């Protein structure tokens, strides 16, 4: 049923779905945007962590006597205490504050931590060895669909192979951390976080364990985060360093800055679980997939973690026989944190790669093969459309050759593809919109902009609703004292925040229309806001400019409230999307180096709010995908139990010259009726599988594990 | 496997031990790899190029010329330019990310050439023209590289952006007509985690030949 809150019809949209400059673009480009790391408060101290050099052990003693004599030392707090167990190298033991960053470092170095070393284990790819070390636990054993034995019997072509991808880390450019300014009862926290509204309770809870401080209430805490330098799923909590930073501020009576250094950021502040396993797939001669069976394992630190949704997308319970076994390997590495689309990129590799291998065995073009099997997915029509569109963008028809059919020269070219899905159910959100007598409009909520474009999307929605332009709207986010809105994770933000903003803005406008109706002598229902005017639809001569309309408020400010969810608030959002990506690569079979020629991506997210920033999200996902497909992996050394490449020199990310041509197509005006759906995760899922498939297509053999580094390419060629 | 042997934790070089005097090792550690506690460094005395004067470890008075303005400050000789800019002078546009000359987030111009401020000592920047992101726009008018960064959405979280803008400015300062692959080469000393390179390279390409702010 139509409501006044519904999104305007396509012909009535002047801003939604179009390209807009990022509202916060100039401030960022000028270097004026103040991030948590940039806060310099008067009298501020600098704090550093002391971390464990051993991967598993028990603390025997902590000696700070020398540290306390270091020049500039101001105080320290223990994060762990004697008797506590350490489960990974880099685990925070203590935080120490000094007057300068250099002195804080000196003081940290002067702390002696005595640790009793215990057995450690940091490797999981060889699951047999991990099992012998008693590190393996069953996590899943599921059978679904038709009878498996019968399905294998009926399968005319089968393929079995080993696939996998290692642990990677978030490596946010702004590290985790914060400045805490504790004055009297007020605790101001400038935190680099994805969860502005959630941090106060998290911090208060953490502090309540410190008896010397006494009871702290969430209401005392104000989190201020107008800008933050990347999270990707790793920045939802205050973390031990945030609590320690607040304790230090309380103890010293000064503001304290504690940001992780690069080694700490990469080692302990986030990792994405690995996944390895044997996969068997079977099909009829005509290409119909009939069976999928996998035995996989993963690690995400001491708790194990990571369970990919297998088989991925092609998972129809009625038609496809499935058997999934998954094991968790417990390792002494930094614990897993959500990483854009948790478990999906792994699932895509463990499904799309064996399926493309099967298609090669069937002598089928993957485009035809995946289209044929689209009925096994939840959204066949979306995928078929997207596959065709994507194939056109990458010129699949002309460029694709059969596997291994790529000429006699040393450089081989190949194409590969992958499909993905994501939910992205909108998070809860409350919004307050104000219309001031001077015509000013502000939108307020305790949301945050991680770089995804929250400032811009909210501006688009409010301006569209009020018939104004983007610069007319002031966005207040990044402060926990504002109306509560959800954490930004799982592609839930744009759906939740645009809905609450739309409802709040419609409500505020209704009230303004009431005032205007009276002064124009028309029905409020006859009024429309467009082009900086409010006018009667039946008689456009009855009109007031926006500024004059607002003047009629006298000295009253209108406030409109909106929330998500809201049963009576129209159909503004949804969840569940599909996307397709195709990669075109060249592989030098003499050096093992893979070059990206092009990646094409087609993505459905329901109603696109700002096209430019949606595309940016997809570009970013593809570029991150190139990194984890080709370069990026956290490498652990069993002897020392440490991460060997905990920096940015040997922990390789992609650079501007590594990405080839990227082409993005956002599906618009096709599924708009579904409303707004998040875009952060979906495009981040497929790049690895698509690139791996393109490499296999180019060189004729499968390189089983990602990243597809030159040594692995050459080894796979040598094995062939 | 278990050794059960107590070991000592992170007690790498205390300040006291390393402060005794200059050695080549501590100097190198201070530049790139060290535990951070290098005590003193050697600067070359301008008047007598071959005469080395040790300074530090206590703070020394220096003057830095930043965006055309002189700033007097006191720094320990081990303090890097990025830390002096950010911690003492509140020039926070340039970011400290890798702190090891890999990511370019700290890029500033020294005498017109791009430099990593994380791997330059503040005392070494004396007598040189330091230009930071804060100094390249003219009031409200952004430098063309900045304008095109906005136009091509060359930024997401924006944390790498100041470094990329400075690298981009260095490219267009040197070459008013760079090819796209020259742009890519010029940007290869910078890293973005959000993945903004499509916009970044287009922005720099378009800004070439468009002058300054
Ligand atoms: S912080 Fe200087 S290059 Fe990364
Ligand atoms: S925009 Fe976030 S790191 Fe580049």
Image (tube, grey):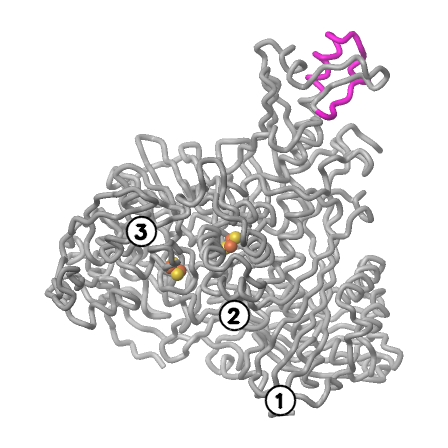
Q: Residues within 10 Å of mark 2 (few under 14, many from 20)?
A: many
Q: Tally the numbered discs.
A: 3
Residue A246 occupies quadrant = top left
Image position of A117 (left or right of B148): left
Check whether the beta carbons of the residues at disc 3 and disc 2 lie within 8 A of each other: no
CA–CA distance between discs 3 and 2? 37 Å
Residue A611 covered by magenta stretch: no
Secondary structure of residue under mark 2? loop
Give the extent of the magenta segment: A510-531
Residue at mark 3 shares a chain with residue at mark 2 = no
Task: Tell me the number on the disc at residue A717.
Answer: 1
Q: Position of residue A588 (x, y in %)?
A: 61, 83
Secondary structure of residue under mark 1? helix
Residue ID for mark 3: B129
Can residue B134 be seen in the rendering of this structure?
yes
> Which marked residue is nearer to the observer: mark 3 or mark 1?
3
Q: Is residue A317 or residue A474 the one in the foreground? A: A474
Image position of A606 (left or right of A346): right
Task: Tell me the number on the disc at residue A632.
Answer: 2
Q: Residue at x 59, y 62 (%)?
A: A623
Q: Residue at x 63, y 26 (%)?
A: A561
Ligand 2 is within 8 Å of the C-beta of the residue at disc 2: no
Image position of A324 (left or right of B172): right
């Amino acid at each position: 049923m139509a409501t006044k809150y519904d999104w305007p019809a396509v012909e009535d949209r002047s801003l939604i779905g179009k390209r807009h400059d990022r509202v916060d673009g100039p401030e960022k480009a000028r270097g004026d945007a103040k991030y948590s790391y940039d806060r310099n408060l008067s009298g501020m101290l600098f704090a550093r962590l002391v971390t464990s050099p051993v991967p598993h052990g028990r603390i025997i003693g902590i000696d700070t006597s020398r540290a306390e004599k270091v020049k500039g030392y101001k105080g320290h707090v223990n994060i762990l205490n004697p008797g506590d167990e350490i489960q990974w190298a880099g685990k925070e033991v203590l935080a120490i504050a000094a007057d300068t960053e250099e002195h804080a470092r000196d003081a940290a170095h002067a702390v002696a931590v005595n640790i009793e070393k215990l057995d450690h284990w940091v490797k999981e790819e060889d699951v047999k060895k991990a099992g012998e070390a008693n590190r393996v636990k069953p996590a899943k054993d599921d059978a679904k669909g038709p009878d498996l034995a019968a399905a294998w019997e009926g399968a005319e072509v089968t393929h079995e192979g080993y696939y996998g991808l290692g642990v990677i880390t978030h490596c946010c450019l702004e590290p985790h951390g914060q400045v805490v300014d504790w004055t009297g009862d007020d605790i101001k926290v400038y935190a680099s976080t994805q969860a502005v509204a959630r941090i106060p309770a998290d911090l208060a809870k953490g502090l309540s364990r410190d008896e010397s401080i006494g009871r702290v209430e969430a209401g005392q805490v104000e989190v201020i985060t107008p800008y933050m330098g990347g999270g990707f799923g790793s920045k939802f909590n205050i973390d031990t360093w945030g609590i320690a930073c607040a304790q230090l501020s309380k103890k010293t009576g000064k503001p304290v800055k504690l940001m992780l250094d690069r080694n700490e950021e990469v080692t302990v502040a986030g990792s994405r679980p690995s996944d390895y396993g044997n996969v068997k797939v079977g099909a009829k001669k005509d290409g119909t997939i009939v069976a999928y069976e996998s035995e996989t394992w993963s690690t995400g630190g001491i708790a194990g973690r990571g369970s990919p949704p297998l088989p991925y997308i092609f998972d129809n319970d009625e038609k496809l026989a499935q058997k999934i076994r998954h094991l968790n390997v417990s390792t002494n590495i930094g614990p897993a944190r959500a990483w854009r689309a948790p478990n999906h990129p792994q699932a895509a590799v463990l499904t799309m790669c064996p399926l493309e291998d099967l298609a090669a065995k069937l002598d089928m073009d993957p485009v035809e093969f995946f289209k044929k099997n689209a009925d096994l997915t939840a959204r066949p029509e979306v995928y078929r459309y997207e596959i065709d569109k994507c194939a056109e963008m990458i010129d699949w028809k002309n460029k694709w050759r059969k596997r291994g059919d790529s000429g006699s020269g040393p450089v081989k070219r190949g194409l590969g593809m992958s499909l993905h899905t994501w939910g992205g159910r909108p998070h809860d959100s409350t919004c307050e919109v104000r219309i001031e007598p001077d015509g000013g409009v502000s939108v307020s909520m305790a949301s945050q902009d991680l770089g995804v474009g929250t400032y811009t999307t909210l501006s688009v929605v409010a301006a569209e609703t009020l018939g104004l332009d983007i610069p007319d709207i002031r966005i207040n986010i990044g402060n926990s004292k504002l109306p509560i809105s959800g954490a930004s994770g799982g592609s839930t933000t744009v759906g939740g925040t645009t809905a609450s903003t739309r409802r709040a803005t419609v409500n505020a406008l209704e009230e303004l229309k009431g005032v205007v109706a009276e002064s124009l002598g028309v029905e409020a229902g006859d009024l429309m806001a467009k082009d900086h005017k409010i006018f009667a639809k039946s008689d456009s001569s009855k009109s007031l400019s926006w500024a004059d309309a607002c003047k009629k408020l006298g000295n009253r400010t209108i406030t409109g409230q909106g929330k998500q969810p809201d049963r009576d608030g129209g159909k503004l959002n949804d969840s569940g999307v599909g996307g397709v990506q195709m990669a075109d690569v060249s592989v030098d079979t003499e050096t093992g180096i893979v070059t990206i020629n092009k990646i094409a991506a087609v993505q459905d997210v329901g109603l696109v709010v700002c096209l430019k920033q949606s595309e940016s999200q997809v570009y970013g996902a593809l570029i991150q995908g190139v990194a984890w497909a080709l370069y990026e992996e956290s490498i652990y050394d069993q002897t020392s139990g440490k991460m060997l490449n905990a920096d940015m020199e040997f922990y390789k990310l992609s650079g501007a010259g590594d990405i080839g041509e990227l082409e993005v197509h956002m599906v618009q005006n096709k599924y708009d009726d579904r409303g707004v759906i998040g875009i952060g995760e979906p495009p981040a899922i497929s790049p690895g599988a698509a690139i791996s498939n393109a490499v296999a297509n180019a060189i004729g053999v499968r390189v089983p594990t990602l990243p597809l580094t030159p040594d692995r390419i050459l080894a796979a060629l040598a094995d062939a | 496997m278990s050794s059960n042997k107590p070991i000592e934790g992170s007690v790498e070089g205390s300040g006291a031990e390393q402060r005794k005097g200059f050695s080549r090792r501590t100097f190198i550690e201070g530049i790139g790899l060290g535990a951070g506690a290098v005590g003193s460094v050697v600067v070359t005395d301008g008047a007598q190029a071959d005469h080395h004067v040790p300074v530090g470890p206590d703070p020394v008075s220096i003057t830095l010329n930043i965006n055309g303005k002189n700033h007097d400050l006191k720094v320990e000789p081990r303090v890097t330019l990025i830390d002096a800019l950010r911690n003492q002078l509140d020039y926070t546009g340039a970011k400290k990310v890798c702190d090891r000359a890999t990511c370019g987030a700290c890029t500033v111009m020294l005498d017109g050439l791009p430099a990593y401020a994380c791997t330059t000592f503040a005392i070494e920047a004396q007598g040189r023209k330091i230009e930071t992101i804060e100094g390249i726009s003219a009031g409200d008018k952004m430098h063309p590289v900045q304008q095109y960064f906005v136009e091509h959405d060359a930024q997401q979280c924006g944390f790498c952006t100041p470094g990329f803008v400075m690298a981009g400015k260095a490219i267009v300062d040197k070459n008013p007509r760079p090819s796209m692959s020259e742009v890519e080469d010029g940007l290869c000393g910078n890293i973005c985690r959000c993945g903004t390179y499509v916009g970044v390279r287009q922005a720099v390409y378009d800004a070439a030949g468009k002058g300054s702010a």
